Amino acid sequence: MEEEWGVANGESLRANVILHNAALNSVPRGSWALPMALVQRMENADLPPDLITWNTLGSKSIWAHALMALAAARRGGLQPSLVSFAAKGPWRAAAALCQAMRQSGLQGNRISSNGLLGICASEGQWRFCLEILSGLEPDTLSFSSCASASEKGHQWMPALRLVQSSVQQGCAADMVLHSAALSSCEKCHRWRLAMSLLDRNCLELPQDVDLIAFNAVISACAKDGQWQWALHVLRRIRGRLRANVVSMNAAISACEKGGVWEVALELLRGMPRQALEPELQSFNSAMSAAARGRRWEVALALLQSLPGNSQPDVVTLGAAVTACEAASRWDWALGFLSEAKASACASDIVFNAAISACAKGGQWQWAIEILFEMSQSMQATLISFNSAMSACANSGRWEAALALLEQAEKASSIDAFSLSAAVLACAKGQRWAEALWLTGSDLVDMASFGAACSCLELAAASPLPLLARVQHEALRKLR
Protein backbone atom coordinates (compact mmCIF):
# COMPACT_ATOMS: atom_id res chain seq x y z
CA MET A 1 0.00 0.00 0.00
CA GLU A 2 2.79 2.47 0.90
CA GLU A 3 4.57 1.66 -2.36
CA GLU A 4 1.38 2.29 -4.31
CA TRP A 5 0.85 5.57 -2.40
CA GLY A 6 4.38 6.72 -3.26
CA VAL A 7 3.82 6.00 -6.94
CA ALA A 8 0.50 7.83 -6.87
CA ASN A 9 2.05 10.74 -5.01
CA GLY A 10 4.89 10.89 -7.58
CA GLU A 11 2.43 10.90 -10.47
CA SER A 12 0.47 13.66 -8.74
CA LEU A 13 3.68 15.62 -8.22
CA ARG A 14 4.58 15.21 -11.90
CA ALA A 15 1.09 16.31 -12.87
CA ASN A 16 1.49 19.46 -10.81
CA VAL A 17 4.83 20.23 -12.49
CA ILE A 18 3.24 19.75 -15.90
CA LEU A 19 0.36 22.02 -14.87
CA HIS A 20 2.73 24.76 -13.76
CA ASN A 21 4.78 24.39 -16.95
CA ALA A 22 1.62 24.82 -19.01
CA ALA A 23 0.79 27.95 -17.03
CA LEU A 24 4.32 29.28 -17.70
CA ASN A 25 3.92 28.62 -21.40
CA SER A 26 0.74 30.72 -21.53
CA VAL A 27 2.53 33.83 -20.18
CA PRO A 28 3.30 36.43 -22.92
CA ARG A 29 6.94 36.60 -24.02
CA GLY A 30 8.96 39.30 -22.28
CA SER A 31 7.14 39.03 -18.95
CA TRP A 32 9.31 38.24 -15.95
CA ALA A 33 7.49 38.90 -12.72
CA LEU A 34 4.63 36.41 -13.25
CA PRO A 35 6.84 33.52 -14.49
CA MET A 36 9.18 33.96 -11.54
CA ALA A 37 6.22 34.00 -9.19
CA LEU A 38 5.06 30.68 -10.64
CA VAL A 39 8.53 29.15 -10.23
CA GLN A 40 8.69 30.42 -6.65
CA ARG A 41 5.31 28.86 -5.98
CA MET A 42 6.57 25.52 -7.32
CA GLU A 43 9.60 25.61 -5.04
CA ASN A 44 7.47 26.56 -2.01
CA ALA A 45 5.22 23.58 -2.78
CA ASP A 46 8.21 21.24 -3.04
CA LEU A 47 7.67 20.91 -6.79
CA PRO A 48 11.19 20.88 -8.26
CA PRO A 49 11.32 22.75 -11.59
CA ASP A 50 12.40 20.49 -14.44
CA LEU A 51 14.27 21.27 -17.66
CA ILE A 52 11.02 22.18 -19.41
CA THR A 53 10.34 24.73 -16.67
CA TRP A 54 13.67 26.48 -17.14
CA ASN A 55 13.53 26.24 -20.95
CA THR A 56 10.09 27.86 -20.95
CA LEU A 57 11.21 30.50 -18.49
CA GLY A 58 14.28 31.32 -20.60
CA SER A 59 12.39 31.53 -23.87
CA LYS A 60 9.67 33.73 -22.41
CA SER A 61 11.92 36.22 -20.66
CA ILE A 62 14.27 38.95 -21.64
CA TRP A 63 17.89 37.94 -22.16
CA ALA A 64 19.28 38.85 -18.73
CA HIS A 65 16.67 36.80 -16.97
CA ALA A 66 17.15 33.96 -19.43
CA LEU A 67 20.78 33.76 -18.37
CA MET A 68 19.66 33.72 -14.74
CA ALA A 69 17.31 30.85 -15.56
CA LEU A 70 20.15 28.92 -17.17
CA ALA A 71 22.29 29.37 -14.07
CA ALA A 72 19.44 28.21 -11.83
CA ALA A 73 18.90 25.13 -14.01
CA ARG A 74 22.55 24.20 -13.64
CA ARG A 75 22.42 24.64 -9.88
CA GLY A 76 19.52 22.22 -9.88
CA GLY A 77 21.67 19.59 -11.57
CA LEU A 78 19.87 19.93 -14.93
CA GLN A 79 21.70 19.87 -18.27
CA PRO A 80 20.41 22.70 -20.54
CA SER A 81 19.30 21.85 -24.07
CA LEU A 82 19.32 23.99 -27.22
CA VAL A 83 15.80 25.17 -26.34
CA SER A 84 17.30 26.81 -23.27
CA PHE A 85 19.17 29.25 -25.49
CA ALA A 86 16.18 30.68 -27.36
CA ALA A 87 16.03 34.05 -25.60
CA LYS A 88 16.48 37.13 -27.77
CA GLY A 89 18.18 40.36 -26.87
CA PRO A 90 21.28 42.52 -27.44
CA TRP A 91 24.32 40.99 -29.12
CA ARG A 92 26.22 40.80 -25.84
CA ALA A 93 23.46 38.55 -24.58
CA ALA A 94 23.89 36.39 -27.68
CA ALA A 95 27.61 36.20 -26.94
CA ALA A 96 26.90 35.16 -23.35
CA LEU A 97 24.39 32.55 -24.50
CA CYS A 98 26.88 31.23 -27.04
CA GLN A 99 29.52 30.89 -24.34
CA ALA A 100 27.03 29.18 -22.04
CA MET A 101 26.23 26.69 -24.81
CA ARG A 102 29.89 25.82 -25.18
CA GLN A 103 30.32 25.43 -21.42
CA SER A 104 27.34 23.07 -21.41
CA GLY A 105 28.97 20.96 -24.11
CA LEU A 106 26.23 21.73 -26.63
CA GLN A 107 26.99 22.06 -30.32
CA GLY A 108 24.67 24.67 -31.77
CA ASN A 109 22.53 23.57 -34.68
CA ARG A 110 21.65 25.78 -37.62
CA ILE A 111 18.45 27.03 -36.03
CA SER A 112 20.04 28.17 -32.78
CA SER A 113 23.19 29.48 -34.51
CA ASN A 114 21.22 31.41 -37.12
CA GLY A 115 19.19 32.90 -34.31
CA LEU A 116 22.37 34.13 -32.62
CA LEU A 117 23.67 35.40 -35.98
CA GLY A 118 20.45 37.35 -36.52
CA ILE A 119 20.80 39.08 -33.16
CA CYS A 120 24.42 40.05 -33.79
CA ALA A 121 23.75 41.08 -37.39
CA SER A 122 21.01 43.49 -36.33
CA GLU A 123 23.65 45.42 -34.35
CA GLY A 124 26.43 45.22 -36.93
CA GLN A 125 28.65 42.89 -34.86
CA TRP A 126 30.36 41.40 -37.90
CA ARG A 127 33.42 40.02 -36.07
CA PHE A 128 31.31 37.94 -33.68
CA CYS A 129 29.13 36.79 -36.58
CA LEU A 130 32.19 35.51 -38.42
CA GLU A 131 33.34 33.76 -35.23
CA ILE A 132 30.01 31.93 -34.96
CA LEU A 133 30.09 31.12 -38.67
CA SER A 134 33.54 29.52 -38.39
CA GLY A 135 32.17 26.73 -36.16
CA LEU A 136 29.04 26.09 -38.16
CA GLU A 137 27.92 24.24 -41.26
CA PRO A 138 26.33 27.36 -42.72
CA ASP A 139 23.38 27.69 -45.01
CA THR A 140 22.24 30.62 -47.13
CA LEU A 141 20.61 32.31 -44.12
CA SER A 142 23.87 32.09 -42.16
CA PHE A 143 25.82 33.80 -44.93
CA SER A 144 23.11 36.43 -45.41
CA SER A 145 23.11 37.33 -41.70
CA CYS A 146 26.90 37.69 -41.66
CA ALA A 147 26.81 39.82 -44.82
CA SER A 148 24.16 42.03 -43.25
CA ALA A 149 26.39 42.49 -40.18
CA SER A 150 29.33 43.37 -42.45
CA GLU A 151 27.19 45.94 -44.24
CA LYS A 152 26.15 47.61 -40.98
CA GLY A 153 29.79 47.59 -39.89
CA HIS A 154 30.91 49.17 -43.19
CA GLN A 155 33.09 46.15 -43.99
CA TRP A 156 33.08 45.46 -47.73
CA MET A 157 35.87 42.86 -47.83
CA PRO A 158 34.20 40.35 -45.45
CA ALA A 159 30.92 40.84 -47.30
CA LEU A 160 32.47 39.97 -50.66
CA ARG A 161 34.30 36.99 -49.16
CA LEU A 162 30.99 35.72 -47.79
CA VAL A 163 29.48 35.83 -51.28
CA GLN A 164 32.43 33.82 -52.58
CA SER A 165 32.31 31.33 -49.68
CA SER A 166 28.59 30.74 -50.17
CA VAL A 167 29.27 29.74 -53.78
CA GLN A 168 32.18 27.47 -52.80
CA GLN A 169 30.05 25.66 -50.21
CA GLY A 170 27.25 25.10 -52.68
CA CYS A 171 24.66 27.30 -51.00
CA ALA A 172 21.80 28.53 -53.12
CA ALA A 173 22.32 32.01 -54.55
CA ASP A 174 20.40 34.53 -52.50
CA MET A 175 19.61 38.14 -53.35
CA VAL A 176 19.56 39.13 -49.68
CA LEU A 177 23.19 38.11 -49.41
CA HIS A 178 24.15 39.86 -52.63
CA SER A 179 22.20 43.03 -51.74
CA ALA A 180 24.01 43.24 -48.40
CA ALA A 181 27.34 42.94 -50.21
CA LEU A 182 26.30 45.66 -52.67
CA SER A 183 25.28 47.97 -49.81
CA SER A 184 28.67 47.33 -48.16
CA CYS A 185 30.41 48.46 -51.34
CA GLU A 186 28.20 51.54 -51.47
CA LYS A 187 28.92 52.56 -47.89
CA CYS A 188 32.66 52.06 -48.39
CA HIS A 189 32.87 54.03 -51.67
CA ARG A 190 33.70 50.96 -53.76
CA TRP A 191 31.65 51.74 -56.83
CA ARG A 192 33.71 49.61 -59.23
CA LEU A 193 33.23 46.53 -57.06
CA ALA A 194 29.52 47.32 -56.78
CA MET A 195 29.27 47.51 -60.58
CA SER A 196 31.11 44.21 -60.97
CA LEU A 197 28.92 42.46 -58.39
CA LEU A 198 25.77 43.81 -60.05
CA ASP A 199 26.88 42.40 -63.41
CA ARG A 200 27.49 39.06 -61.74
CA ASN A 201 24.06 39.13 -60.10
CA CYS A 202 22.36 39.87 -63.41
CA LEU A 203 24.03 36.78 -64.86
CA GLU A 204 23.46 34.39 -61.94
CA LEU A 205 20.13 35.76 -60.59
CA PRO A 206 18.51 37.41 -63.61
CA GLN A 207 14.99 37.09 -62.19
CA ASP A 208 15.86 38.08 -58.61
CA VAL A 209 17.92 41.27 -59.05
CA ASP A 210 15.65 43.85 -57.46
CA LEU A 211 15.46 47.62 -57.37
CA ILE A 212 17.27 47.74 -54.03
CA ALA A 213 20.37 46.26 -55.65
CA PHE A 214 20.31 48.73 -58.55
CA ASN A 215 19.77 51.66 -56.21
CA ALA A 216 22.71 50.60 -54.04
CA VAL A 217 24.98 50.67 -57.10
CA ILE A 218 23.71 54.11 -58.18
CA SER A 219 24.37 55.41 -54.65
CA ALA A 220 27.87 53.91 -54.74
CA CYS A 221 28.56 55.76 -58.00
CA ALA A 222 27.03 58.95 -56.56
CA LYS A 223 29.33 58.99 -53.54
CA ASP A 224 32.36 59.16 -55.84
CA GLY A 225 30.78 61.58 -58.31
CA GLN A 226 30.62 58.96 -61.08
CA TRP A 227 27.58 60.48 -62.69
CA GLN A 228 27.98 58.82 -66.09
CA TRP A 229 28.06 55.35 -64.52
CA ALA A 230 25.11 56.28 -62.30
CA LEU A 231 23.08 57.22 -65.37
CA HIS A 232 24.19 54.00 -67.06
CA VAL A 233 22.79 51.94 -64.17
CA LEU A 234 19.62 54.05 -64.21
CA ARG A 235 19.11 53.17 -67.88
CA ARG A 236 19.60 49.50 -67.01
CA ILE A 237 16.84 49.79 -64.42
CA ARG A 238 14.45 51.18 -66.99
CA GLY A 239 15.19 48.22 -69.22
CA ARG A 240 13.81 45.71 -66.71
CA LEU A 241 12.20 47.48 -63.75
CA ARG A 242 10.57 50.79 -62.89
CA ALA A 243 12.83 53.36 -61.24
CA ASN A 244 11.54 54.88 -58.02
CA VAL A 245 12.23 58.12 -56.16
CA VAL A 246 15.26 56.58 -54.43
CA SER A 247 16.78 55.76 -57.83
CA MET A 248 16.26 59.28 -59.12
CA ASN A 249 17.53 60.93 -55.95
CA ALA A 250 20.73 58.90 -56.10
CA ALA A 251 21.23 59.78 -59.77
CA ILE A 252 20.66 63.50 -59.12
CA SER A 253 23.12 63.34 -56.22
CA ALA A 254 25.69 61.76 -58.55
CA CYS A 255 25.25 64.65 -60.97
CA GLU A 256 25.63 67.14 -58.12
CA LYS A 257 28.93 65.63 -57.01
CA GLY A 258 30.02 65.31 -60.63
CA GLY A 259 29.43 69.01 -61.23
CA VAL A 260 26.83 68.63 -64.00
CA TRP A 261 23.97 70.79 -62.80
CA GLU A 262 22.20 70.73 -66.18
CA VAL A 263 21.83 66.93 -66.06
CA ALA A 264 20.68 67.08 -62.43
CA LEU A 265 18.02 69.62 -63.38
CA GLU A 266 16.91 67.50 -66.32
CA LEU A 267 16.49 64.43 -64.09
CA LEU A 268 14.50 66.46 -61.56
CA ARG A 269 12.18 67.87 -64.20
CA GLY A 270 11.69 64.43 -65.74
CA MET A 271 10.42 62.80 -62.54
CA PRO A 272 6.75 63.84 -62.96
CA ARG A 273 6.76 62.31 -66.46
CA GLN A 274 7.59 58.99 -64.78
CA ALA A 275 4.74 59.45 -62.28
CA LEU A 276 7.30 60.15 -59.55
CA GLU A 277 6.83 63.04 -57.15
CA PRO A 278 10.13 64.78 -56.31
CA GLU A 279 11.00 64.86 -52.62
CA LEU A 280 12.87 67.50 -50.67
CA GLN A 281 16.05 65.47 -51.17
CA SER A 282 15.52 65.64 -54.94
CA PHE A 283 15.36 69.45 -54.84
CA ASN A 284 18.26 69.66 -52.39
CA SER A 285 20.61 67.75 -54.69
CA ALA A 286 19.57 69.77 -57.72
CA MET A 287 19.94 73.05 -55.79
CA SER A 288 23.39 72.04 -54.54
CA ALA A 289 24.41 71.12 -58.09
CA ALA A 290 23.30 74.54 -59.38
CA ALA A 291 25.01 76.35 -56.50
CA ARG A 292 28.28 74.49 -57.15
CA GLY A 293 27.98 75.40 -60.80
CA ARG A 294 27.68 79.11 -59.86
CA ARG A 295 24.13 79.15 -61.26
CA TRP A 296 22.64 80.97 -58.33
CA GLU A 297 19.48 81.99 -60.20
CA VAL A 298 18.66 78.32 -60.91
CA ALA A 299 19.26 77.32 -57.29
CA LEU A 300 17.03 80.09 -55.93
CA ALA A 301 14.34 79.31 -58.52
CA LEU A 302 14.32 75.70 -57.30
CA LEU A 303 13.96 76.98 -53.75
CA GLN A 304 10.85 78.86 -54.79
CA SER A 305 9.40 75.74 -56.44
CA LEU A 306 9.64 73.43 -53.43
CA PRO A 307 6.49 71.33 -52.89
CA GLY A 308 4.00 72.97 -50.57
CA ASN A 309 4.36 70.25 -47.93
CA SER A 310 8.17 70.49 -47.82
CA GLN A 311 9.97 72.62 -45.28
CA PRO A 312 13.55 73.67 -46.14
CA ASP A 313 16.13 71.77 -44.13
CA VAL A 314 19.82 72.36 -43.45
CA VAL A 315 20.82 71.13 -46.93
CA THR A 316 18.25 73.36 -48.64
CA LEU A 317 19.30 76.48 -46.80
CA GLY A 318 23.00 75.63 -47.16
CA ALA A 319 22.56 75.44 -50.94
CA ALA A 320 20.61 78.72 -50.90
CA VAL A 321 23.34 80.55 -48.98
CA THR A 322 26.00 79.09 -51.29
CA ALA A 323 24.00 80.38 -54.25
CA CYS A 324 23.90 83.85 -52.66
CA GLU A 325 27.68 83.68 -52.26
CA ALA A 326 28.02 82.99 -55.99
CA ALA A 327 25.72 85.93 -56.72
CA SER A 328 27.66 88.23 -54.34
CA ARG A 329 24.37 88.87 -52.55
CA TRP A 330 25.51 88.94 -48.96
CA ASP A 331 22.23 90.51 -47.86
CA TRP A 332 20.24 87.54 -49.20
CA ALA A 333 22.70 85.21 -47.50
CA LEU A 334 22.01 86.88 -44.15
CA GLY A 335 18.29 86.42 -44.72
CA PHE A 336 18.65 82.70 -45.36
CA LEU A 337 20.98 82.40 -42.38
CA SER A 338 18.32 83.97 -40.16
CA GLU A 339 15.76 81.52 -41.53
CA ALA A 340 18.12 78.63 -40.84
CA LYS A 341 18.64 79.77 -37.24
CA ALA A 342 14.91 80.20 -36.70
CA SER A 343 14.24 76.65 -37.87
CA ALA A 344 17.26 75.17 -36.02
CA CYS A 345 18.90 74.26 -39.35
CA ALA A 346 22.02 76.42 -39.04
CA SER A 347 24.96 74.05 -39.59
CA ASP A 348 28.61 74.93 -40.04
CA ILE A 349 28.07 74.71 -43.82
CA VAL A 350 25.39 77.41 -43.67
CA PHE A 351 27.47 79.66 -41.40
CA ASN A 352 30.61 79.26 -43.52
CA ALA A 353 28.76 80.02 -46.74
CA ALA A 354 27.27 83.16 -45.16
CA ILE A 355 30.71 84.32 -43.95
CA SER A 356 32.13 83.72 -47.43
CA ALA A 357 29.26 85.67 -49.02
CA CYS A 358 30.00 88.61 -46.71
CA ALA A 359 33.71 88.36 -47.55
CA LYS A 360 33.01 88.61 -51.27
CA GLY A 361 30.65 91.49 -50.63
CA GLY A 362 33.25 93.41 -48.64
CA GLN A 363 31.22 93.13 -45.43
CA TRP A 364 33.99 92.32 -42.97
CA GLN A 365 31.99 93.46 -39.94
CA TRP A 366 29.18 91.05 -40.78
CA ALA A 367 31.68 88.25 -41.40
CA ILE A 368 33.14 88.67 -37.92
CA GLU A 369 29.68 88.99 -36.38
CA ILE A 370 28.55 85.71 -37.99
CA LEU A 371 31.77 83.99 -36.88
CA PHE A 372 31.19 85.15 -33.30
CA GLU A 373 27.56 84.00 -33.42
CA MET A 374 28.64 80.65 -34.83
CA SER A 375 31.13 80.09 -32.02
CA GLN A 376 28.32 80.52 -29.47
CA SER A 377 26.51 77.41 -30.70
CA MET A 378 29.19 75.21 -32.28
CA GLN A 379 32.90 74.83 -32.89
CA ALA A 380 34.08 77.27 -35.55
CA THR A 381 36.23 75.50 -38.16
CA LEU A 382 39.39 76.66 -39.87
CA ILE A 383 37.28 77.34 -42.95
CA SER A 384 35.19 79.72 -40.85
CA PHE A 385 38.23 81.65 -39.61
CA ASN A 386 39.84 81.73 -43.05
CA SER A 387 36.70 83.13 -44.66
CA ALA A 388 36.44 85.83 -42.00
CA MET A 389 40.15 86.70 -42.38
CA SER A 390 39.65 86.89 -46.14
CA ALA A 391 36.86 89.41 -45.55
CA CYS A 392 39.21 91.49 -43.39
CA ALA A 393 42.01 91.18 -45.97
CA ASN A 394 39.77 92.41 -48.78
CA SER A 395 38.96 95.50 -46.71
CA GLY A 396 42.50 96.05 -45.41
CA ARG A 397 41.46 95.48 -41.79
CA TRP A 398 44.80 94.19 -40.59
CA GLU A 399 44.07 94.51 -36.87
CA ALA A 400 40.97 92.32 -37.16
CA ALA A 401 42.80 89.85 -39.40
CA LEU A 402 45.64 89.42 -36.91
CA ALA A 403 43.18 89.01 -34.04
CA LEU A 404 41.32 86.30 -35.99
CA LEU A 405 44.63 84.61 -36.83
CA GLU A 406 45.45 84.40 -33.14
CA GLN A 407 41.99 83.02 -32.29
CA ALA A 408 42.23 80.42 -35.07
CA GLU A 409 45.60 79.24 -33.79
CA LYS A 410 44.18 78.82 -30.29
CA ALA A 411 40.96 77.14 -31.47
CA SER A 412 42.45 74.60 -33.85
CA SER A 413 45.28 75.26 -36.26
CA ILE A 414 46.19 77.53 -39.13
CA ASP A 415 47.35 76.86 -42.67
CA ALA A 416 49.01 78.71 -45.54
CA PHE A 417 45.70 80.32 -46.52
CA SER A 418 45.30 81.75 -43.00
CA LEU A 419 48.73 83.41 -43.13
CA SER A 420 48.22 84.59 -46.71
CA ALA A 421 44.99 86.35 -45.72
CA ALA A 422 46.69 87.99 -42.72
CA VAL A 423 49.70 89.11 -44.80
CA LEU A 424 47.39 90.49 -47.50
CA ALA A 425 45.44 92.41 -44.86
CA CYS A 426 48.68 93.92 -43.54
CA ALA A 427 49.79 94.72 -47.10
CA LYS A 428 46.56 96.56 -47.84
CA GLY A 429 46.85 98.36 -44.52
CA GLN A 430 50.51 99.26 -45.34
CA ARG A 431 51.73 97.51 -42.21
CA TRP A 432 55.03 96.26 -43.60
CA ALA A 433 56.55 95.31 -40.23
CA GLU A 434 53.65 93.00 -39.33
CA ALA A 435 53.61 91.51 -42.84
CA LEU A 436 57.31 90.71 -42.64
CA TRP A 437 56.94 89.23 -39.19
CA LEU A 438 54.29 86.83 -40.51
CA THR A 439 56.59 85.66 -43.31
CA GLY A 440 58.82 83.98 -40.75
CA SER A 441 56.42 81.04 -40.47
CA ASP A 442 57.12 77.80 -42.35
CA LEU A 443 53.47 77.73 -43.41
CA VAL A 444 53.79 80.85 -45.54
CA ASP A 445 53.52 80.21 -49.29
CA MET A 446 54.61 82.32 -52.27
CA ALA A 447 51.32 84.22 -52.27
CA SER A 448 52.17 85.53 -48.80
CA PHE A 449 55.64 86.61 -49.92
CA GLY A 450 54.12 88.35 -52.90
CA ALA A 451 51.77 90.24 -50.61
CA ALA A 452 54.70 91.14 -48.34
CA CYS A 453 56.70 92.45 -51.29
CA SER A 454 53.72 94.52 -52.38
CA CYS A 455 53.51 95.87 -48.86
CA LEU A 456 57.13 97.00 -49.00
CA GLU A 457 56.60 98.68 -52.34
CA LEU A 458 53.66 100.61 -50.93
CA ALA A 459 55.62 101.71 -47.87
CA ALA A 460 57.75 104.77 -48.72
CA ALA A 461 60.14 104.11 -45.83
CA SER A 462 60.74 100.45 -46.65
CA PRO A 463 64.39 99.64 -45.87
CA LEU A 464 66.17 97.60 -48.52
CA PRO A 465 67.57 95.03 -46.07
CA LEU A 466 64.07 93.95 -45.20
CA LEU A 467 63.17 93.60 -48.85
CA ALA A 468 66.28 91.49 -49.31
CA ARG A 469 65.13 89.27 -46.45
CA VAL A 470 61.78 88.71 -48.15
CA GLN A 471 63.48 87.82 -51.41
CA HIS A 472 65.93 85.50 -49.63
CA GLU A 473 63.10 83.69 -47.84
CA ALA A 474 61.16 83.39 -51.08
CA LEU A 475 64.13 81.76 -52.81
CA ARG A 476 64.69 79.44 -49.86
CA LYS A 477 61.11 78.23 -49.96
CA LEU A 478 61.28 77.71 -53.74
CA ARG A 479 64.19 75.34 -53.24
Image (cartoon, rainbow, N blue to C red):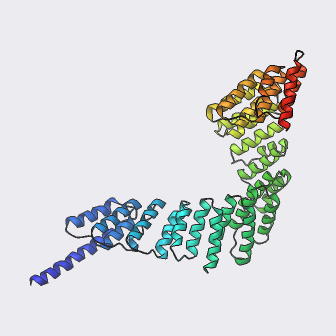
Counting every numbered tag in the picture gives: 0
- Give the left or right position of residue 97, taking residue 165 as reference: left
- Give the left or right position of residue 184, taking residue 286 as reference: left
Q: Quadrant of the C terminus?
A: top right
Q: How far across and how far down the image is residue 158, in percent?
A: 62, 66
Please state which of residues 190 and 41 is positioned toward the viewer in this rendering: 190
Please state which of residues 218 and 272 is positioned toward the viewer in this rendering: 218
Q: How far across and how far down the image is residue 107, in percent?
A: 43, 75
Which residue lies at the image location 58% right of the left edge and 75% below the top edge?
140
Which residue lies at the image location 23% right of the left edge and 73% below the top edge?
16
Question: In the displayed image of the protein, which residue is found farthest to the left?
Answer: 1
Please state which of residues 76 and 287 is positioned toward the viewer in this rendering: 76
Q: How far across and how far down the image is residue 325, in percent?
A: 80, 37
Establish if 64 lies above or below 140: above
Q: How far across and how far down the image is residue 201, in percent?
A: 71, 73
Quarter assignment of residue 337: top right
Q: Quadrant of the N terminus?
A: bottom left
- Judge whether residue 176 can be spotted in this image: no
Establish if 220 lies above or below 347: below
- Give the left or right position of residue 356, taking residue 61 as reference: right
Question: In the displayed image of the protein, which residue is found farthest to the top?
Answer: 461
- Judge whether residue 285 can be spotted in this image: yes
Which residue lies at the image location 76% right of the left edge and 34% below the top edge?
442
